[in-house]
Image (cartoon, coloured by chain):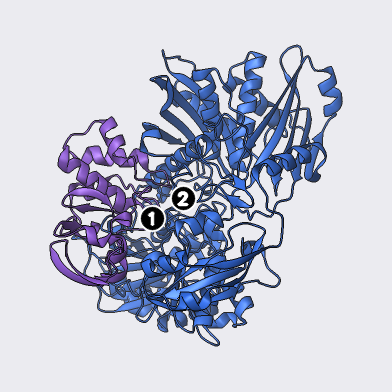
């Protein structure tokens, strides 16, 4: 057992308990109170009475346990894995656990957001302590009841027993007595080797509800008296609404109101990224009626900025690579001199267009705003930021705003930005009643917070022995450059230069699954593959040589990765894929990348079917520390691989006169069934390092490994995404 | 506006709506059957898949007026207790990530297996081609369809 300070005090628990008593923790109409929707046969009986132990845990008189999952669920499966961590330290049987989504409660929970693959990493200790604190309180209550000391008791699977005797008491029997117990200031955590739940595969707690079509998503929310709302934004970036045929629209069937809302937030923060802050809003009874009303809109738009197109974007990126403003850089040794004396210099340019997030559930939010309060329910990765923005825009005190999180039909970074929740609140306020705002697919795709367009120039110098003596990268992005100066190969090359360059655009952009890493990994890993080929070296050996340098004699003061772990995943995947044993008609590529504190290496096998390349099999080696829920972790990496292939191969958003050319899935191509690999095998490095995230790191190396395997299959190097396009299209 | 009598999941429903209304919105807005999802509105993503007389159909482009006496099955009516072989296989493989597209994937897969109890990989790919999963659960979906053939 490890003694650890809880950082809790009695006040924080009381605060959340009071909130729970007020019914705040169970705010959703479709959650059947505390009863699980469908009780599996083997589960204990549904309790008559529940007892709040702390803000994470509630125990019923039958021993059923409710664990609140604090963070938003976007498909990364934290609604299962976070409660698993609590249940482990509480020491209960997982089959008697029901999980509920916690609302935003900044007074108790920390880091209630879904982004940067950070949920498990940031909450690992807090979740363990929540469980351990609950166990300790139950044990203290039992000790009192049995007139023993806590040291005389053991707790296991929801039962507390005396060590030297026969007496025992279940959590359900003692829960009522634990309610008044002082919250311990120090608790003991389990040894990692004693874990019974963490490290075992547990099914998605919402699985049954998903496959039976229960209403879990923001789009599905329904309230008595609620109206629906839709918005119409200007047809292009750089345009603004002046007026529209308001009276005509208001007379249309089912339409209750129509008006222009302004959602301009003073002192905006990063999460307030928004394509358009003046929107036409239509409120009405049904979706189809609103869609008809949208079609009947006749608006006057005015041009207030430049109407950009893809040719202009390409020019800006090319110019930025020549003389753009450098945001961040790193220099080791003397790259200029090293390139001059190099026997071979290799220089390549890589690019990628803008991309949309395209969560399959379009943006939506429920809002019920009164003069001085706001109830907000919907899909958000950043509930706290949403609360703050609504407070600022509508001048409502934070304490009068509640945010409940629905299961999200995908996030990928799109729902880090809060504008659609803010728009819902502004529309509800102006309309004077509860509304649910829903975007059409076209609304969603044409006013995104897009993945930026990128262009990077990589350069490598080899000496006469084919040793990499110089490496440089200049990367420009609209608006942010795709360069991480302190990541690999920083620390592994004597003469090194990395420059991150920004360029201007009025297209709204933001974080998109593995921001910048998705592009950087593809470009850098494809480039190193080509350098290794020119050097006449095996691509894995070539990388391992570089890691050896970073391990034994690192260049510069610091780098952001642990070279041993980086090399470790490459060695793992090398072994599992039998790298080096060539199979006829199978073409292999490899890549490795470190981002979001997790290391992933991937090997792709491509075959030619009717002359067309097809990804047959993918092997992944992953080091994310302790794996909480192995099968779900595999699912996440598999998804990242498929997502990486799809976006590298097929997806792009191009612009003409300030408007995207693609507004729906007829023109914007996402990967489909037949284009996915047949098999993706995932292997984890086993260690006892605190867990890091998996939502993002599986994607970036897929882009590089795909490009490298495609080269082997077709003899063609791919420098420009999407790989299916013959033209170097940028944005 | 016109009155339509619809047979959905074995029950009769009467709705009074504009005849051009896609059945998707009749289900979601008028009958509170929310399992069928909106994804694109142009029959490209498959999230809205339902069965009309057993045939997998995109409900987002199917006007209510075109349905007549046909039987409609939605994800809510695919099985009594969520135990259709495809649903069971989906749970066995723990397929969903975000879960939003899965009702549509399941409905397409169930219709496929009704007509073709032992589809080849290529037949699965062809049948599932119009169902997008943005999370990338395709490998598991295929495994689950193969498992469902054995349940």
Task: Tell me the number on the disc at residue A153.
Answer: none
Instruction: Say which of A691 and A511 sits in front.
Output: A511
Asked if A600 appears above or below A169 in the picture, the reply is: above
At which x and y percent is residue A130?
47, 66
Is residue A632 at all visible to an observer of this figure? yes
- Residue at 44% across / 26% down in the picture? A576
Q: The blue chain is which one?
A: A
- Residue at 45% across / 60% down in the picture? A440
Query: How far apart are the alpha carbons under marks 1 and 2?
Result: 9 Å
Chain ID of residue with mark 1: B
State whether discs 1 and 2 lie on one chain. no
Callout 1 touching callout 2 (CB < 8 Å): yes
At which x and y percent is residue A7?
57, 68
Chain ID of residue with mark 2: A
Q: How many dots with numbers?
A: 2
- Residue at 32% across / 77% down in the picture? A50
Instruction: Say which of B92 and A84 sits in front.
Output: B92
Of helix, strand and loop, which one carries label 1? loop
Asked if A602 appears above or below A437 in the picture, the reply is: above
Quarter of the figure that contains the C terminus of chain A = top right
Asked if B91 appears above or below A536 in the picture, the reply is: below
Kindly identify which residue carries mark 2.
Answer: A664
- Residue at 57% across / 52% down in the picture? A116
Residue A523: which quarter of the image? Answer: top right
Kindly identify which residue carries mark 1.
Answer: B41
Mark 2 surroundings: few (<14), some (14-19) or many (≥20) residues within 10 A? many
Q: Which chain is purple?
A: B
At which x and y percent is residue A403?
49, 73
Instruction: Say which of A124 and A717 sits in front.
Output: A717
Is residue A183 at all visible to an observer of this figure? no
């Amino acid at each position: 057992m490890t003694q650890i300070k809880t950082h809790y005090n009695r006040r924080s628990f009381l605060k959340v308990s009071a909130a729970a008593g007020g019914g705040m923790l169970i705010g959703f109409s479709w959650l059947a109170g505390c009863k699980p929707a469908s009780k599996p046969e083997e589960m204990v009986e549904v309790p008559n009475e529940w007892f709040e132990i702390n803000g994470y845990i509630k125990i019923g008189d039958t021993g059923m346990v409710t664990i609140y999952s604090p963070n938003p669920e976007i498909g990364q499966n934290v609604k299962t894995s976070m409660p698993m961590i609590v249940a482990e330290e509480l020491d209960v049987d997982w089959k008697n656990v029901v999980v509920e989504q916690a609302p935003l409660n900044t007074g108790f929970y920390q880091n209630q957001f879904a982004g940067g693959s950070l949920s498990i990493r940031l909450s690992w200790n807090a979740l363990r302590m929540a469980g351990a604190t609950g166990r300790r309180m139950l044990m203290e209550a039992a000790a009192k009841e049995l007139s023993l000391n806590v040291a005389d008791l053991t707790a296991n699977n929801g039962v507390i027993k005396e060590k030297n005797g026969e007496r025992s008491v279940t959590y359900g029997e003692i829960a009522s007595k634990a309610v008044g117990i002082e919250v311990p200031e120090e608790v003991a955590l389990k040894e990692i080797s004693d874990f019974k739940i963490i490290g075992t595969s547990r099914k998605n707690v919402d699985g049954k509800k998903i496959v039976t079509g229960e209403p879990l998503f923001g789009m599905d929310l329904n309230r008595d008296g609620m109206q629906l709302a839709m918005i119409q934004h200007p047809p292009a970036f750089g345009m603004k609404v002046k007026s529209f045929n308001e009276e005509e629209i208001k007379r249309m069937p089912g339409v209750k109101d129509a008006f222009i809302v302004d959602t301009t937030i003073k002192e905006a923060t990063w999460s307030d990224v928004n394509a358009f802050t003046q929107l036409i809003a239509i409120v009405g009874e049904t979706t189809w009626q609103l869609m008809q009303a949208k079609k009947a809109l006749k608006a006057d738009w005015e041009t207030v900025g430049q109407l950009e197109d893809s040719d202009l974007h390409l020019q800006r990126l090319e110019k930025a690579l020549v003389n753009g403003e450098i945001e961040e850089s790193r220099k080791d040794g003397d790259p200029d001199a090293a390139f001059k004396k190099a026997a071979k210099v290799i220089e390549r340019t890589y690019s990628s267009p803008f991309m949309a997030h395209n969560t399959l559930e379009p943006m939506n939010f429920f809002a019920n705003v009164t003069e001085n309060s706001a109830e907000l329910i919907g899909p958000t990765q950043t509930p706290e930021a949403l609360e703050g923005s609504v407070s600022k825009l509508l001048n409502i005190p934070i304490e009068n705003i509640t945010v409940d999180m629905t299961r999200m039909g995908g996030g990928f970074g799109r729902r880090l930005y809060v504008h659609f929740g803010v728009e819902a609140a502004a529309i509800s306020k102006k309309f004077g009643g509860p509304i649910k705002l829903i975007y059409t697919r076209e609304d969603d795709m044409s006013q995104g917070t897009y993945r930026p367009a990128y262009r990077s120039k990589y350069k490598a110098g080899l000496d006469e022995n084919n040793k990499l003596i110089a490496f440089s990268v200049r990367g420009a992005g609209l608006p942010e450059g795709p360069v991480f100066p302190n990541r690999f190969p920083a620390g592994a090359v004597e003469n090194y230069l990395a420059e991150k360059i920004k360029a201007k655009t009025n297209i709204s952009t933001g974080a998109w699954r593995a921001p910048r890493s998705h592009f950087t990994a593809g470009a850098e890993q494809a480039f190193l593959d080509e350098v290794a080929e020119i050097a006449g070296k095996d691509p894995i050996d070539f990388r391992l040589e570089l890691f050896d340098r970073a391990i034994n004699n690192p260049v510069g003061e610091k780098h952001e990765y642990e070279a041993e772990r980086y090399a470790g995943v490459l060695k793992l995947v090398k072994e599992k894929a039998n790298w080096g044993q060539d199979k006829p008609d199978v073409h292999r590529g490899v890549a490795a990348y470190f981002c979001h504190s997790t290391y992933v290496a991937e090997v792709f096998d491509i075959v030619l079917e009717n002359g067309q390349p097809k990804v047959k099999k993918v092997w992944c080696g992953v080091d994310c520390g302790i794996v909480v829920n192995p099968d779900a972790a595999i699912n996440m990496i598999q998804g990242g691989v498929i997502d990486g292939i799809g976006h590298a191969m097929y997806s792009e958003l191009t612009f003409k006169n300030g408007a995207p050319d693609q507004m729906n899935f007829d023109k914007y191509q996402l990967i489909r069934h037949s284009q996915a690999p047949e098999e993706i095998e995932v292997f984890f490095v086993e260690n006892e390092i605190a867990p890091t995230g998996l939502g993002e790191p599986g994607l970036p190396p897929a882009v590089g490994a795909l490009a490298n395997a495609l080269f082997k299959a077709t003899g063609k190097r791919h420098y420009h995404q999407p790989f299916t396009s013959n033209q170097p299209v940028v944005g | 506006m016109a009155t339509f009598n619809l047979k959905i999941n074995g029950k009769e429903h009467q709705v009074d709506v504009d005849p051009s209304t896609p059945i998707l919105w009749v289900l979601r807005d008028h009958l509170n059957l929310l399992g069928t999802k909106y994804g694109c509105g142009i029959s490209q993503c498959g999230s809205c898949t339902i069965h009309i007389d057993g045939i997998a159909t995109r409900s987002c482009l199917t006007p209510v007026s075109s349905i007549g006496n046909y039987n409609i099955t939605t994800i809510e009516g695919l099985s009594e207790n969520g135990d259709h072989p495809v649903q069971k296989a989906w749970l066995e493989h723990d397929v969903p990530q975000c879960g939003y597209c899965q009702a549509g994937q399941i409905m397409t897969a169930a219709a496929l297996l009704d007509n073709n109890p032992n589809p080849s990989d290529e037949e699965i790919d062809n049948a599932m081609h119009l169902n997008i999963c943005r999370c990338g659960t395709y490998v598991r979906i295929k495994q689950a369809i193969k498992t469902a053939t054995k349940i």
